[in-house]
Each structure stands twice: as C-alpha cells, then as structure tokens.
Image: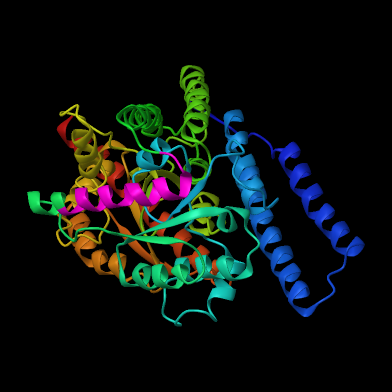
Amino acid sequence: MSQIDNKRNKPEMNHVIKNVIENKCDDHHRNPPTTMAERQRQRFVDKATKVSAKYLRRLAELPGAPDAMEPFFKVLQDIYVDLKNVAKPADTKIIGTYCVMVPNELIYAVGAQPVKLCSGSYTAFAIGDDLVPRDACPLIKAVMGFQAMEVMPIYDDCALMVVPITCDCKKKMAGMLKQRVPTYALHVPTAKSEDRDMEQYVQELYQLIPELEAVTGQTISYQSLAESIDAMGFAQYQMSKFNEFKKHVPALIKGTHAMALMNAFSYLPVEQWSQQLHRLNQELARRKKDKHYVSKDKQPRIMITGSPVIFPNIKIPLLIEETGGILVGDETCMGERSLYDPTVVVDQSFDGLMRSLANRYTRPCTCPTFVDNSQRIYRIKQMIADHQVQGVVYHVLRGCLVYDFEYQTLEDELGKLGIPVIRVESDYNEEDIEQLRIRIEAFIELIKLKDLETRISKLKKSEIAG
C-alpha cells in the first residue's frame, strides 16, 4: 500500500523568503534611489526578486520535497532573490553559456566556472520586449532585459559569453551581446550524421580554446581536460541513478522538484552539484525502501517536452502537479538532456578527448535545431516506455519556431501509440495562468477517463475469458 507524502509546507524556506523580501523593502526605504535611472533600476529589482520569491515559495510548498532538495532551492534563491553571484573561488572566471551544446568540460579545464544564462524572468522579459523584435522568443527578451538593466551579478561578472548559433534568434542575440560584453559565437552543424559534420564541430571547439585561455590566463592541458571529463562523468552517473528513481511507480519525487534540481545545475560547480545529487539519491533510496511515495497508484503520469522550462517561469510544471498529475519525465534542454549521455573516450590522446566531446554534445542531442530529428522522436518514445508516461505536454515558447515545427510530427507518432498530447503555447507573462490551468486540468481528466476505460475493458475481457 503506497504511503502518500503529505509533508507540510517548509516553514523554514518560507521564513527565509519572507525575510529577504522584507529586508529589501527596508533597504529601499533607508536608501531611496535619487535619479530616474536608479528608481527604474530599483523597481526592476523589486519586481524581479518578488516574482522569483513567489515561485520559489510555491516550489517549497509543493508537498513531498525531499530534505536534500533544500540546497538546490537555496541556489535559486541566491541567484534570483538575493541577486548573488555563483559560489566560486575568488580568482575563478565565470563563462556564460546559452545552450547545452557548449562543452562544460572545456570551461572547467581552463579553470573557469560555466554558468548557463538562459533566463525565465518575467520582469526581464518585459524590459527585453522593448529591445528586440516583438516576435522574438521570450528567452532572448529576458536575456537582453537582464543585460540591459545590469542587476544580475552572474551576467555582469562574465569574462566571456559563449553563444551556440542554433537558431536565428541566438544568432542575432550573439551580435547584440557582442556590443556590450566579450562574446564568442559557437557555430553548430545543422546535421550530425556525417563525419564532415563532426569535423566541423571539432574545429569549432578547437577555436574556442584560445578564447577561453585568453580571458582566464590559463591553458587547457591534457590532464585538466581529462579531469574535467571525469568530473562531468560523475555528475552523469548520479543523474542516471536519479533517472532510475524517477521511473518508479508510484513516484518518489515530484517532477517540478526535479526540474528545480536541473535548473540549479546551471549555477553550481559540478562537483558540488554532483555530491548534493548523490545525497538526494540516497534519500530517494530510503524512500523506495520505506514505500514513501509522493503520488497515488493511479495518478496520471505526465511528461513535458518542447521549449525549455527555466526558473522562475515554472508555471507549466507547477500547474501539472497542482491539478492532479505527476510529472515523471522532462525531455527539455534545461532537464535531463544536459546530462543523460556520458562522454565516451576511445582515443586517449588530446585530439581524441576533443573528438569525444564533439560527439557527446551533438550526436545524442535531441535539439530540433538539427535537420533530421528522427532521433528525438525515438528518444521521447523511449522515455514514455521507461517512465510509463500516460500523456505528454508539449511546451512551446511563443516565437520558438524550431520546437513548434516538431509538434505535428510528434503528435502523429504518439497517436499511433495511443498517447495523448497537448500543445501548450505561452511566454513569460502570468496573464495566461488560469487559461493554462483549465486546459491542463482538462487534459489530466481526459487521461484519467482513458485509463478508467482501459481498466474496465480489461476487466470485461478477463470475465469473458474466465
């Protein structure tokens, strides 16, 4: 018999968030801004931190959060509520990245800290709306909004921005960023099946090395690169164990909490993140042994795919789990896609390590930016089977054409398997939350009805056979 975790709200987390907001208000009254620019900047900070604190509170209040999740919550609080920089040694440079196709191993090998700067901020999105074309995707608007307001230390303290050119918006964003900060455009091949595609990407990675070395003052050696591959390998190993726990029926952890964990990966040193995930895996192992579950046996198991879900824009996963579903799979570039496939080294030379990285960051990648996306369909089907998924939410950020193109193909393929799919288009505003709630709730009820009909049909067949 499953034991549903009705764990109460985390009062300590709510208390921390409340104090942060109150302290910011006190600081504002003690040191009021004097100029128009300062007042505008202060309003931006107040709104951005309060929205982030609200969603962090909702994360903490979602029942069933393991104790080992609190350090991951704390990272999101540090970055988005307290507006702190990432935890790092004083002499370590920060390298900003904007995609999973930038090898973290190269950045760690040069003694720097990679930070993924893709943003889900509602407030920065509103600022960026005046800086880029109306139909640009919300992610680009939020990034440019933060860059323009100069209030986020993780943006302001970057020694270099590395932007993979995976879509037209990223291409133009790289150009706009270059006018403000040192920026390197990393060209990604549009295909990955041929050797010449890999050769092109290998050369791109080789060209990135002197850029990294120039801003850090350190060189990449064979030893440092091999050690960084090992460090990322440990993170991938812990992620594979975590994914095994996510497959469990009933669920051992809420999917929204799992997505927060993956968002925290963007800001933590890999060794620190891996060790904390190791502790979380140990807690989930105890939950499994004690039959300590966070879902009911018949609760609809949902997977999310499509455009990235980036904190604090986590309204979709929250709605899924607040309206009766359990989120068990995340096939997005802010989710397990970042770590599900390890680097396989065959040739032990330096060039062999570089080619292994090029293969790892492209061949298994299911990003729809590639011309042939049959591998992505296969991966999603595989996850549906592994996680016993009953329905798929296809998330499309308004203006994100590469993901929108893929929806019809996925719907057709999953229709053959009898798996319902719902396309959910949104951006970073909060005005559509109730409309989304109604649609997602109806989708979950549809899955419940479909499951009930299946059970009744099986029961009738067994009675006839008997």
Instruction: Name the residue located 53 percent from the left edge and 39 percent from the top edge.
Output: 268
Residue 402 shown left or right of residue 435 in the figure: left
From the viewer's perspective, is residue 117 above or below residue 246? below
From the viewer's perspective, is residue 221 above or below residue 41? above
Residue 189 seen in the figure = yes
Instruction: Name the quarter where the C terminus is drawn.
Output: top left
Q: Quadrant of residue 367?
A: bottom left
Could you say where residue 451 lies in the image, as x and y percent from the top left? 33, 47
Whether the magenta-drawn stretch holds residue 377 is answered as: no
Q: Quadrant of residue 227?
A: top left
Residue 100 seen in the figure = no
From the viewer's perspective, is residue 267 above or below residue 83? above
Residue furthest out toward the right: 30
Instruction: Name the residue located 54 percent from the left edge and 40 percent from the top edge.
Output: 92
Query: For this rendering, which residue is in front, 300 or 426?
Result: 426
Whether the magenta-drawn stretch holds residue 204 is answered as: yes
Could you say where residue 417 lies in the image, as x and y percent from the top left? 19, 51
Query: For this rendering, which residue is in front, 111 or 176?
Result: 111
Instruction: Name the residue located 41 percent from the left edge and 80 percent from the top edge.
Output: 135
Q: What's drawn in magenta, residue-wise?
A: 200-218
Figure disc tally: 0
Instruction: Name the residue located 38 percent from the left edge and 38 percent from the top edge.
Output: 219
Please identify the dominant SS of the magenta region: helix
Residue 238 shown left or right of residue 37 in the figure: left
Could you say where residue 91 lies in the image, as x and y percent from the top left? 58, 39
